[in-house]
């Protein structure tokens, strides 16, 4: 891996460390809340409704978080929302310690936590390019992916062990400590002040952000290709049925972890991505590999064959994410970065949900294997169609793209001004 952002940027090290601690704490709650809901109600529906309660605030606050990230000081937003997240977990801790914990608190606090997290994410994502050199943005995106993938493999199992062995109250208490530690690191971040030419947060500023994205075919390509890949080839809802077909219940965990394993391998070997300049073509190629790997997974006769294909798909998704983040961070003006991060959050959250719905519907029509393979083929076809329809996205080159050149020049001039 290219570790230069960690070596060269104190603020990036602080953000990275905060992210590692915060991810572990987040998984503690992601495991503990459904577990506690199951213990209190014994109802599948009650557990599922937790995600339903989180969805609307996640979408609404994600879009609004993008608007305020461009209109206000991002560091202040990050700190305030981190405090809010810590308070929500404290409420869950107090509720868990009551003689008769209340179910409604899990729903309300779950919605609040989703809202705070979605308000925070656009500011966090738009702050990162300000603390890393322009030529290190690809490496920074790969490191962020590494942090996420390592956490996605290690944190759920450790969180489940803590919650199951010591109780949900212990899990919540540890999560409060992780938020306090993360808050200290975030407080130490001293990022350069952002541009102040963005309008105040409003519906019209949100619409203006959408219009800016639509005027940029290269940006629209990053959103549309990712949504197509998720809608047609994301199919985690099929994994329990696939494990049953193999007659190996223990394979379920393998299937769920395969993508994260592949992504982790891709991230720790991602040094080569710094030498790629045609990032649009990189996203297209990675999305095609993702779809092809899912197609092959549907045809594999063994558990390990499916695991390898899903891991390959995860690796391709990781590379696609690195190149998409590079395009965003290299070309989006600072005054729009928060709003477009909110749009990205919307595509990131909606794609997998629609993908699982598509996978379930196709499985009802033709079975698990049909749904996997046909979805993968549809993904390849949709990505190829978008590559043909969006030549500016397909031909994007960071060395010559007008937006990348303008942003690189602006940052070089800003660095010179700081030095002088």
Image (cartoon, helix red, strand yellow):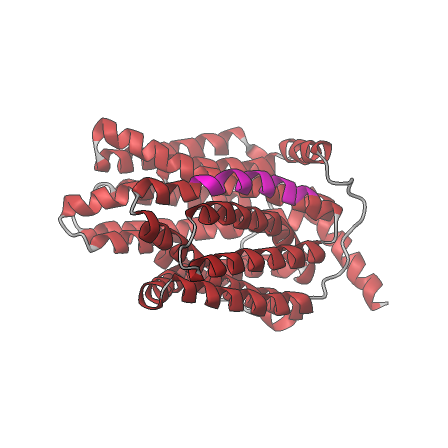
Q: Looking at the image, which residue sits at the far left?
A: 247
Q: Is residue 61 one of those drawn in magenta?
A: yes
The vertical placement of 161 against 251, above or below, is: below
Q: Position of residue 164 (x, y in %)?
A: 32, 63
| Magenta: main secondary structure | helix
Location of residue 18 by image quarter: bottom right
Q: Is residue 187 one of those drawn in magenta?
A: no
Tell me the quarter of the image containing the C terminus.
bottom right
Q: 94 or 332: nearer the eye? A: 94
Which segment did they paint magenta? 52-67
Q: Position of residue 143 (x, y in %)?
A: 52, 62
Q: Looking at the image, which residue sits at the far front?
A: 99
Q: How many marks?
A: 0
Q: Position of residue 53 (x, y in %)?
A: 47, 40
Q: For this view, does 406 lie left or right of residue 37?
A: right
Residue 206 in view (yes/no): yes
Location of residue 238 by image quarter: top left
Q: Looking at the image, which residue sits at the far right?
A: 420
Residue ID at (44%, 39%): 52
Q: Position of residue 272 (x, y in %)?
A: 49, 60
Residue ID at (30%, 29%): 361
The vertical placement of 87 against 17, above or below, is: above
Q: 63 or 362: nearer the eye? A: 63
Residue ID at (64%, 45%): 65
Residue 394 in view (yes/no): no
Q: Looking at the image, which residue sits at the far bottom?
A: 7
Q: For this view, does 15 lie left or right of residue 47?
A: right
Residue ID at (33%, 39%): 45
């Amino acid at each position: 891996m290219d570790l230069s952002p960690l070596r060269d940027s104190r603020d990036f090290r602080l953000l990275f460390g905060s992210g590692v601690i915060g991810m572990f704490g987040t998984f503690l709650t992601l495991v503990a809340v459904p577990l506690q809901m199951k213990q209190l109600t014994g109802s599948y529906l009650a557990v599922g409704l937790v995600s339903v309660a989180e969805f609307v605030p996640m979408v609404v606050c994600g879009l609004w978080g993008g608007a305020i990230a461009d209109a206000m000081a991002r560091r202040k937003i990050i700190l305030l929302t981190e405090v809010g997240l810590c308070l929500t977990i404290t409420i869950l801790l107090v509720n868990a310690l009551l003689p008769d914990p209340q179910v409604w608190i899990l729903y309300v606090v779950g919605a609040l936590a989703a809202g705070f997290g979605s308000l925070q994410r656009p500011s966090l994502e738009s702050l990162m390019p300000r603390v890393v050199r322009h030529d290190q943005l690809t490496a920074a995106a790969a490191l962020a992916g590494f942090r996420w993938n390592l956490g996605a493999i290690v944190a759920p199992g450790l969180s489940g062990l803590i919650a199951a062995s010591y109780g949900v109250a212990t899990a919540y208490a540890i999560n409060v400590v992780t938020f306090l530690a993360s808050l200290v690191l975030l407080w130490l971040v001293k990022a350069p002040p952002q541009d102040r030419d963005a309008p105040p947060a409003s519906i019209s500023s949100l619409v203006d952000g959408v219009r800016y994205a639509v005027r940029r075919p290269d940006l629209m390509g990053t959103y549309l290709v990712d949504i197509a890949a998720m809608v047609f080839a994301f199919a985690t809802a099929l994994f329990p049925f696939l494990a049953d077909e193999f007659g190996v219940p223990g394979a379920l965990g393998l299937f769920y972890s395969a993508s994260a394993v592949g992504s982790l391998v891709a991230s720790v070997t991602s040094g080569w991505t710094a030498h790629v300049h045609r990032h649009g073509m990189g996203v297209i190629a990675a999305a095609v590999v993702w779809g092809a790997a899912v197609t092959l997974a549907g045809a594999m006769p063994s558990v390990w064959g499916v695991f390898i294909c899903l891991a390959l798909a995860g690796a391709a998704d990781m590379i696609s994410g690195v190149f998409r983040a590079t395009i965003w961070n290299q070309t989006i003006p600072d005054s729009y970065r928060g709003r477009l991060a909110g749009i990205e959050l919307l595509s990131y959250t909606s794609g997998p949900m629609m993908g699982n719905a598509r996978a379930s519907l196709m499985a009802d029509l033709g079975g698990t294997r049909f749904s996997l393979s046909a979805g993968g083929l549809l993904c390849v076809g949709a990505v190829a169609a978008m590559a043909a329809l969006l030549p500016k996205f397909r031909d994007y080159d960071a060395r010559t793209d007008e937006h990348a050149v303008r942003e690189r020049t602006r940052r070089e001039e800003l660095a010179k001004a700081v030095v002088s």
